[in-house]
Amino acid sequence: MRLRRTLLFTLLPLFASCQVYTGKPVDEQAAMTRMQGQLNFNGEQLIFTPCGEKRQFVISNAGASTLLSDAKRLRADGASTLQVDMRGLLGSGDSNDGSFKLDTLYRLQSEGKLCDDLAYRLTKVRASGHEPDWNIGVSPEGMILERIGQKALVLPYLEEQLPEGRMSISSEANGDRVELWVTPQHCVDSMSGAVSHLSAELRVNGQVMRGCGYFGGAQQ
């Protein structure tokens, strides 16, 4: 009996150490939030100001992603303030109001105002491209395809989730076959230089067009 008690007390620290060490917190993903706002430079630091707020957060890991290089490129093109849509983890910091650890960059642009994007919460996917210009928006109610010089198409659709975060959205109605394929991939708009997190391929009755896109607030 004494030997068993000695062995038990010897193993207790080992059990305790197994319980204390948990590695990366399993709820870190759940704690992340998607936010839109303005992005400015302070020297080599990127400062994020959320929409409608005065708080300022230092992007803590800008150099570990393409965000810093993309922001520098847009600034070199003459943009002083950038618009950003991203997901990450708010944290404490030594200066400003804290830090923002970037996880996913959805959009970065110098034109437009993301804070006034009224369709964002109703949008599942939005994509666009050039030569020829096209724009497609997908909501839970349907998709709308707009092209230069042509009447807008409003269509129902079928959605298919594919491996590695890809998605296929297709419709066949009124004699038109429309397919939108999006893939998680760093994508730069050929005209504006804006950055999106999805590359997009649109096929309309066999015609292939390419561009960039992003997931909206209605996409889970």
Image: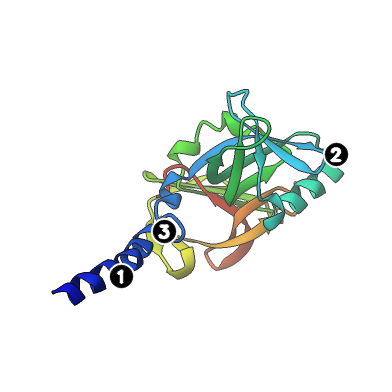
Mark 2: which secondary structure? loop
Q: Position of residue 17 (x, y in %)?
A: 38, 63
- First in sequence: mark 3 or mark 1? 1
**Nearer-the-camera pick, 160 or 50:** 50
Quadrant location of the N terminus in the rendered image = bottom left
- Whether the residues at callouts 3 and 1 have beta carbons within 8 Å, the answer is no
Q: Front-most of 9 and 120?
A: 9
Residue 10: give its label.
1
The label shown at residue 78 is 2
| Between 60 and 82, the one nearer to me in the picture | 60
How far from the left and from the top, in percent, is residue 3? 20, 76
Residue at 63%, 52% (x, y): give it: 196
The CA span between labels 3 and 2 is: 40 Å
Say what amino acid the circle numbered 2 marks.
Gly
Check disc 3 and report its element: helix, strand or loop: strand
Q: Position of residue 18 (x, y in %)?
A: 36, 65
